[in-house]
Structure formats: C-alpha cells, structure tokens
Amino acid sequence: MSANKFPVESLRDRKRRQTRERIIETAFTLFMERGFDVVTVDEIAQRAEIGRTTFFRYFGDKQEVVFSTEDDFLRALTAAMHDAPTEPLQDLAQALATSRRLLLVICTEAARNPGHYAVYHRLVKQHPELEDRHTRKTRHYADLLEKHLIDHGTPPATAVLAAQLTVACYQAAWRLGRHDATAVLREANDAFDLLLGATAA
C-alpha cells in the first residue's frame, strides 16, 4: 500500500476533530447525568472548556450532537454502494441480498463505538423529538437504498418492497438489540435469515 494513499491529518484538522469529539463526549455525559431536556448548550460548552461560539461552529443545536454519527453512517453507506457489484439486481432475492449487506454496513459502523450507541439508543427511546428524527433518518436510508436498487436494474415495485423489508429488519434489530450495538448487528443478521427463509419457503 502506498504511503500516500491516505492524506496525513494536519495539526489544524486534528485539533478540530479533537474539539468536536470533546463536545460530543461532554454532551453525552451531561445528557445521561441530568437529562437531555434540561442540559443547555452553555453547560456543554462550559464543561467542554470551549466558548459558546465554538460550539456553534460544530453543531447547530444540542440535538445535532445526539445525531453526530449520522455523517459517518452516510459515508460508510455511500462507500459500500460505490463498491457494490455492478451486475443487474432484477429480482427480490438479489435485491434483498444487496440490501442485507448494506444494512449490515450501517450496523457495523454503529458497533465501532458501542458506548456512544448505547447512550444514543437511550436518548432516542426517552425523547419523542429525538425518536422522530431517528425515524426520519431511517426513512432517508431506505430512500437511498431504494434508489441504489433501481439504479442497478431492480424494478421499482421490487426496489420499494426490498427497501421496506430492510427497514423492518432494522427496526426489529433496534427493538431486540436495544442499547447493545453488537446485539443490534446480530439481530439484524438474524432478521434477514428469518426473512429469507420465509421467502424461500
């Protein structure tokens, strides 16, 4: 592998990344200590030893902090879609096989930081406004999956069905795995085993 394959992180970029990570960890700690509703941006900034203005350079509000990994998930999903085989996905079995792989990419990304995921799960389950955003995020992933399948030759009706079945597998994993990211990954895989077994019967 070439030494220049990955760009070297500059000092400025490293400081920005470290500041962002400190904001996230500080906010999550405060949310668990005192509750999402009562924690303010000023408190997060003070505990993280930054100014209020600095907080808003990274996040629009405290809700954005809760969903701070969303960009990481989208990058992982986009990369997996880009690397997907190019053969046509013309039937439901092929579409579901691809959908399964892409869903597991997202679940694997979540499992990279199980502590963060555990807090995220608890916050979403405790606060309707966060659960609503989580639902909209899931729907966005389904829309991306549907488009990916159609772009790879899946008939629209089949693509919609495959995307919605994938969402159902994820929702089952979300409920069964709860705040354990590794369990969510396992449950998502098991849900697809059940689904594919049922469709093959």
Image (spheres, rainbow, N blue to C red):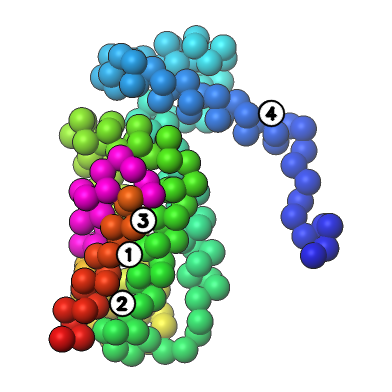
The residue pinned by badge 1 equals: 189
* Closer-to-camera residue (171/49): 171
Please tell me whether mark 2 sits on a helix, a strand or a loop: helix
In the rendered view, tell whether residue 141 sits above or below residue 165: above
Name the residue located 41 percent from the left edge and 80 percent from the top edge: 151
Q: Earlier in the sequence, mark 1 or mark 2?
A: 2
Place residue 168 in its image quadrant: bottom left
Q: Which residues are magenta?
A: 166-182
Q: CA distance from mark 3 to mark 2?
A: 17 Å
The residue pinned by badge 4 equals: 15
Residue 187: x, y in percent? 28, 57
Circles 3 and 1: CB distance less than 8 Å? yes
Instruction: Please name which of the two marks, 3 or 2, marks the residue nearer to the observer.
Output: 3
Q: Amino acid at mark 3?
A: Leu
Residue 1 can be seen, yes or no: yes
The residue pinned by badge 3 equals: 185
**Is 19 on the left-hand or right-hand side of 166?**
right
Name the residue located 55 percent from the left edge and 73 percent from the top edge: 83
Residue 186: x, y in percent? 34, 58
